[in-house]
Amino acid sequence: MSGERQLRVVDLGRREYREVLELQRSIARWRRNSPPDHDLLLLVEHLPVITFGRGSREDVTPPDPAWLAEAGLDLVEIERGGDLTYHGPGQLVGYPILDLRAHRKDLHWYLRRIEEVLLRALAEHGLPAFRVESYTGVWTGSAPAGSLETVEDDGFGTVPAGRADALIGAGAIRKVASIGVHASRWITWHGFALNVTPEPLANFRGIVACGIQGVRMTSLASEGASLTLDDAGAAVVRAFPAAFPSLAPSPAPEVALRI
């Protein structure tokens, strides 16, 4: 049963990364001081950029400056968790700006719920997907029979940590969506990136994506699910109330931002 708190969805179209980063920060600051009665989800397709979280591990190799220059990519350090990732055309990026005081004050729970949103959206379009216990995000591929465990109450499978690295190294499981979030006084920002078309994949080859050695990134289209970004965004929006019981089903995305 869905709740009563509204999730307003705003489609920002294609935007430069730093512009949307400052927008998120401004909205989060305002919401910390004047909490409204609704949450926000910003959907965007970014111009090409590499980002990395301030918590990136020291053993993660930074991108080669010559490669960045040749590819025309900016490198932006941000406050989210997680390591290096790429954003660009063909990728649906979502920034949920939620007040967790209206849901549950638990960042681990919140990360699992964002995974659930994406898992539900992919399942709606027939793409088998699952979690990997040791790495936040959403994965797909050919997990061997019996290798998935049911860890979360949502019923989606999880590859246990002890089997993950071998399956990743063999290319048997591939990452289709990355997640990195930040919260201050229980207001969240940053979010998820779902590769919809194959277009983003080339620029992942110049980085150790998400700090995971040997990881192979994939896209919905590469796995046989040919969706537009609008299709993917609509499926994501429909999945939010199932993952966040306090939320009511969302109306159509807006194009004008009302915070």
Image (cartoon, rainbow, N blue to C red):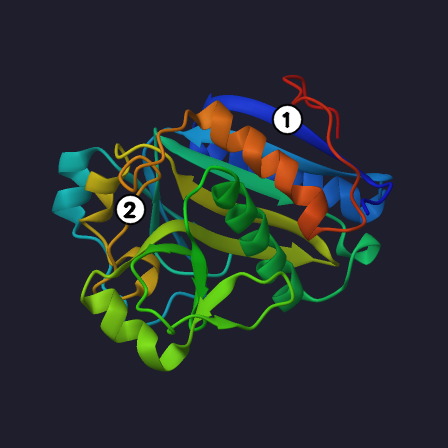
* Quarter of the image that includes the C terminus: top right
Local secondary structure at mark 1: strand
The residue that appears at 45% across and 34% down in the rendered structure is: 92
Farthest-out residue, top: 255
Q: Name the disc covering residue 218, or none.
A: 2
The residue that appears at 12% across and 45% down in the rendered structure is: 66
Foreground label between 1 and 2: 2
Answer yes or no: is residue 79 visible: no
Answer yes or no: is residue 116 visible: yes
Q: Position of residue 158 (x, y in %)?
A: 46, 68
Q: Which residue is mark 1?
A: 10
The relative height of residue 242 versus residue 258 in the rendered view (above or below) is below
Q: Position of residue 138 (x, y in %)?
A: 44, 55
120 to the left or right of 76: right
**Count of residue discs:** 2
183 to the left or right of 22: right
The residue that appears at 42% across and 42% down in the rendered structure is: 194
Q: Nearer the viewer, residue 220 or 192?
A: 220
Local secondary structure at mark 2: loop
Q: Position of residue 222 (x, y in %)?
A: 26, 39
Counting residues from the start of the chain, the first of labels 1 and 2 encountered is 1
